[in-house]
Amino acid sequence: MNLTLRVWRQKGPKEKGHFETYQVQDVTPEMSFFEALDKVNEELITAGREPIAFDHDCREGICGTCSLTINGQPHGPDEAATGCQLHLRAFKSGDTITIEPFRARAFPVIKDLVIDRSALDRVMTAGGFVSVNTGSAAEANSILVPKDKSDAAMDAAACIGCGACVAACPNASAMLFVSAKVSHFALLPQGKPERDRRVLAMQKQMDLEGFGNCSNESECEAVCPKEIKVCNIARMNREFLRAIFWSKE
C-alpha cells in the first residue's frame, strides 16, 4: 500500500500551524496507523528533519492519550476503537489521509498532534473520587449492590478520558466524560455520601475549563471508543438537579 498523509504541524502553543504532506510507501494493511506514523518519523529522522510529535502510551486502547482526528473523525473510521487500534486495512492504497489533533478550546495544542488534556484531570480532581479509609478490602457481601446497578456502573467506569467526545461535539462539550464519572459513583452505595458535592463540583469545574454545553447531538456517543451511552448525561442532570434542590433545604 502507498498512502499520502496530510499532517498538522505546529511548533508550539503560540505558533501558527499548517499541514504538511508525506508519502508512505510499501506499508501493509496489517500495520497499525501508528506504525505508519512511526515509519514516517524514521524517514524524517534519517533525513535530519524534525519528527511528528504525537501522543501514545499503551497502543492497546487503554490509556486514551492518542488524541488524533483522522479524516475528520476522532480516532478514525473504526467504531469503538481508539486511534492506536486503527489499522491500515481501513483505507485503500492511494488514499490521502488528513491527520490533526482534537480541536477544542479546552484542549490547546502543545506541539503538532499533541494536545493538553489536563482540563479533564482537573474535572476529576474536583470530585471524581470517594473518600474512604484505605486498608484491606471489605468482605464482598458486606454491601450488596443490585446487578443492574453494578453493570451500569461498570459500563460508565469504562471511560478512559480520551476526549473524543469533546472533539466530536459541535459545542466541545465534556458532558459524556463528566457524566460517566458521576454515574460511576452515583450508581454505587459507596458514592452516595458525597453525591451532591461531587456533581456540583465537577459541573462547576467543567464550566470553568471552557467546555461547551450539551445540545443532544449524540456525536459523543458515536465516537466513544468505550461506547459510553448518552443516558449517563441524563443521569448526571438528575443528580445535578437533586443536589441543587437539597442545597437549598
Image (cartoon, rainbow, N blue to C red):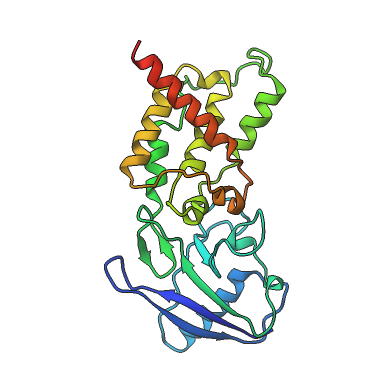
Q: Is residue 19 left or right of residue 148?
A: left
Rendered residue at 66%/15% (across/down)? 144
Residue 131 shows up from this direction? no
Farthest-out residue, left: 14
| Position of 2 relative to 185 (above/below) | below
Farthest-out residue, top: 249
| Position of 46 relative to 125 (above/below) | below
Please identify the quadrant where the C terminus is shown.
top left
| Position of 141 relative to 66 (above/below) | above
Image-quadrant location for residue 137: top right
Q: In this view, does 82 lie to the left or right of 48?
A: right
Q: Where is residue 237 in the image (x, y as percent from the top left)?
A: 48, 30
Rendered residue at 54%/80% (across/down)? 5
Farthest-out residue, bottom: 47
Q: Position of residue 235 (x, y in %)?
A: 54, 29
Image-quadrant location for residue 190: top right
Q: Position of residue 116 (x, y in %)?
A: 38, 56
Disc tally is 0
Q: Position of residue 97 (x, y in %)?
A: 57, 76
Rendered residue at 46%/22% (across/down)? 195
| Position of 130 relative to 221 (above/below) | above
Residue 20 shows up from this direction? yes
Please identify the quadrant where the N terminus is shown.
bottom right
Q: Is residue 169 left or right of residue 111?
A: right
Q: Nearer the viewer, residue 196 or 185?
A: 196
Rendered residue at 36%/52% (across/down)? 106
